Image: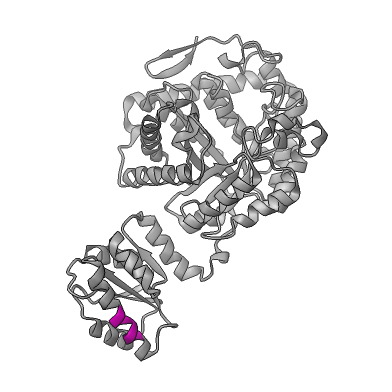
C-alpha cells in the first residue's frame, strides 16, 4: 500500500484542503499520515525519515515570500537525507503560492485550487496504477472504468488548416482537461477521401480540417500524444464507410465509430448514395466496427431531431438504432442524448424524452451489449450572444447530468458564431465540469415527477406504435428492423418523417408537428 504524508507547513493553520486531499487518498486505497497545521520544516523532514512515505503533500496559503524561504529550507532538508529521487512531492495552495512552488522545481504536481475533485482523484489513481502517462487506458471501456464515477469529457476540433489543428490538439492534450478529442474533417474529406479528384477545392476546410492523406491522420494523432494522452476518434466518412472505418482504426485507434442508419444519403445530401444503398452500406460499416472491437454510436435520433421530428419518432428511432447495433454484433454502444433539440423543449419535457430513450435502449442491455450514455447540448439551442450561450451550455448540462453520463460531449458556447479553438474549448469544458460537479452532489429524481413520468411513458407507447408499424411493412421478413428494404420503406411511406424534410426527394416531408407545453407532438 502506498503511503502519503501530509502537512500544512510553516505558520499556516489552514488545513481544510489538506484534509480533503487525504480523505480522497484514503478512499483510493492509500495509507495516510496527517501531521496537521503549522508544521515546522524540521518536523516534516524527521517524519519523512520515520514514515518512509511514497508521496509527501505540502500545503501553504499565506504568501509568496514566506513560502520561498520555507521551500529553500525544505530543499536542503530532503537533500541532506537523500530522498529527493525516491519520493513524489506535491503541493496545494493558492494561485500565488503555487507559482512559487512551481519555480522551486521540487514538486511533481501542484494544485492551485482551480481543480475539480475528479482532477485530484485521477492524479491519485495515476500514481497508483499508471506510472507513465503513455500507459493510460487507450480503449473506451477501459478509460470509462478508470475514470468512474466521473464522466469522460469529449470535444471536437477541426480548423481551417491541418497546421492550425495540430497546434490546437497539442494544447488540448497538454491541458489534461479532455479525455477524448474528436477530429472533425471537412466535408471534402468525409465524402471524397478515397476519390480526391471529386473534391471541390473552393470548399477545402469547410466544416472541419482539410485532412487529405493517411499521413495527415497520423500527424494529428501524434500531436495528441502528450498530457493525459486522450483517446482520439474521428467523424465517419459519408460514403465508403467500411474503408473509412478501417483507415481510422489503423491511424488514430478510433475510440468509437459514429455511423447513422438513414443518413449520409440523398436524405441529407451529404453523399450521393441513394437511401437504400446507404442503409445497406451503413449497416456493413457498423458490422465491420463491431467485428473489430470498435465501439459504435448510431446517431440517427439527433439527425431526425435536428429536422424537427416529433418526440415520439425520436424515441422510436433511438430504440431502433440500438436494436440494430445489438443485432449487428456491437458490444459497446454509445447512446448520445442531444438535449434542447428541437430548440424550445422545456427542461422537464427534455428530460422526459431522454428518460424514455434511456429506458428503451437499456432494456436491451446484457453481457454482450453494453450501452454507454453520452450527453451534449444541442447546437440549435445556442443564441449568437456568447454570454447567453455560456448560460445555455451550463444550464443544459446541469440538468442533463441527471442521466449519469459516462461521457459528456461538450459543445463550445461560441459554435453558433464560429468554430472553436482551444481557448473556447477549454473555457467551455471548465463550465461544464463545474455544472456536472454541482449536479453530482444530488438532483431530484425526475422519474418521480408525475408529469415527467406520464410523458416518458406516453413517448415509449408512441415509439412502440411506430416500431410495430415498421415491422408490418414486411410481415414475411424474419426481422424487419434489420432489413434495409423495410427501413427504406419506413421513410418512403412516411412512417419516419420530419418537418425539416419538406421538399426532399426521398422523404415525404408531410408530417405536421405542434409545439405545446414544452414538447413536440405529431398532429
* Vertical comparison of 152 with 501: above or below: below
* Vertical comparison of 457 with 218: above or below: above
Residue in front for this viewpoint, 55 or 217: 217
Which is the main secondary structure of the residues drawn in magenta?
Answer: helix
Q: At 20% across and 78% down in the image, what residue appears?
A: 39
Residue 427 shown in magenta: no
Instruction: Give the total number of marks visible in the rendering.
Output: 0
Residue in front for this viewpoint, 418 or 507: 418
Q: At 62% across and 37% down in the image, what residue appears?
A: 208
Q: Which residues are magenta?
A: 72-78
Q: At 54% across and 38% down in the image, what residue appears?
A: 335
In the rendered image, residue 484, in percent from the top left (x then y), is placed at 74, 27
* Vertical comparison of 99 with 332: above or below: below
228 left or right, relative to 269: left
In the rendered image, residue 158, in percent from the top left (x then y), is placed at 60, 41
Q: Is residue 512 visible?
A: yes
476 left or right, relative to 462: right
Amino acid at each position: 500500500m502506498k503511503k502519503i504524508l501530509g502537512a500544512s507547513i510553516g505558520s499556516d493553520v489552514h488545513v481544510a484542503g489538506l484534509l480533503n486531499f487525504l480523505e480522497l487518498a484514503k478512499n483510493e486505497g492509500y495509507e495516510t499520515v496527517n501531521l496537521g497545521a503549522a508544521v515546522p520544516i524540521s518536523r516534516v523532514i524527521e517524519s519523512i525519515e520515520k514514515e518512509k512515505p511514497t508521496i509527501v503533500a505540502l500545503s501553504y496559503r499565506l504568501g509568496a515570500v514566506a513560502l520561498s524561504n520555507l521551500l529553500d529550507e525544505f530543499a536542503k532538508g530532503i537533500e541532506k537525507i537523500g530522498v529527493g529521487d525516491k519520493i513524489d512531492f506535491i503541493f496545494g495552495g493558492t494561485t500565488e503560492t503555487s507559482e512559487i512552488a512551481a519555480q522551486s522545481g521540487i514538486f511533481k504536481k501542484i494544485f492551485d485550487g482551480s481543480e475539480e475533485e475528479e482532477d485530484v482523484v485521477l492524479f491519485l489513481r495515476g500514481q497508483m496504477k499508471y506510472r507513465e502517462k503513455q500507459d493510460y487506458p487507450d480503449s473506451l471501456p477501459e478509460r470509462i472504468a478508470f475514470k468512474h464515477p466521473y464522466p469522460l469529457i469529449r470535444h471536437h476540433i477541426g480548423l481551417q488548416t491541418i497546421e492550425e489543428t495540430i497546434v490546437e490538439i497539442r494544447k488540448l492534450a497538454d491541458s489534461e482537461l479532455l479525455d477524448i478529442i474528436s477530429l472533425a474533417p471537412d466535408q471534402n474529406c468525409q465524402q471524397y477521401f478515397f476519390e480526391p479528384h471529386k473534391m471541390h477545392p473552393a470548399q477545402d476546410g469547410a466544416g472541419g480540417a482539410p485532412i487529405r492523406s493517411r499521413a495527415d491522420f497520423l500527424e494529428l494523432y501524434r500531436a495528441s500524444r502528450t498530457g493525459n494522452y486522450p483517446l482520439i476518434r474521428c467523424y465517419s466518412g459519408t460514403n465508403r464507410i467500411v474503408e473509412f472505418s478501417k483507415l481510422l482504426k489503423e491511424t488514430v485507434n478510433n475510440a468509437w465509430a459514429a455511423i447513422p442508419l438513414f443518413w449520409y444519403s440523398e436524405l441529407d445530401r451529404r453523399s450521393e448514395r441513394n437511401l437504400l444503398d446507404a442503409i445497406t452500406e451503413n449497416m456493413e460499416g457498423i458490422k465491420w466496427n463491431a467485428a473489430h472491437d470498435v465501439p459504435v454510436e448510431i446517431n440517427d435520433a439527433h439527425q431526425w431531431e435536428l429536422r424537427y421530428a416529433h418526440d415520439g419518432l425520436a424515441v422510436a428511432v433511438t430504440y431502433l438504432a440500438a436494436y440494430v447495433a445489438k443485432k449487428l454484433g456491437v458490444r459497446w454502444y454509445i447512446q448520445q442524448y442531444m438535449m434542447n433539440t428541437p430548440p424550445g423543449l422545456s427542461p422537464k419535457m427534455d428530460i422526459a424524452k431522454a428518460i424514455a430513450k434511456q429506458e428503451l435502449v437499456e432494456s436491451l442491455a446484457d453481457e454482450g451489449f453494453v450501452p454507454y450514455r453520452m450527453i451534449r447540448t444541442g447546437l440549435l439551442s445556442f443564441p449568437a450572444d456568447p454570454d447567453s450561450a455560456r448560460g445555455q451550455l451550463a444550464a443544459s448540462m446541469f440538468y442533463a447530468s441527471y442521466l449519469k453520463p459516462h461521457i459528456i460531449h461538450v459543445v463550445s458556447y461560441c459554435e453558433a458564431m464560429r468554430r472553436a479553438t482551444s481557448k473556447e474549448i477549454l473555457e467551455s469544458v471548465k463550465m461544464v465540469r463545474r455544472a456536472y460537479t454541482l449536479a453530482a452532489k444530488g438532483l431530484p429524481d425526475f422519474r418521480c415527477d408525475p408529469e415527467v413520468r406520464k410523458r416518458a411513458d406516453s413517448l415509449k407507447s408512441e415509439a412502440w406504435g411506430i416500431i410495430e408499424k415498421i415491422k408490418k411493412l414486411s410481415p414475411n421478413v424474419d426481422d424487419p428492423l434489420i432489413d434495409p428494404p423495410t427501413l427504406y420503406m419506413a421513410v418512403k411511406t412516411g412512417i419516419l418523417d420530419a418537418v425539416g424534410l419538406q421538399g426532399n426527394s426521398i422523404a415525404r416531408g408531410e408530417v405536421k408537428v405542434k409545439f405545446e407545453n414544452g414538447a413536440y407532438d405529431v398532429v
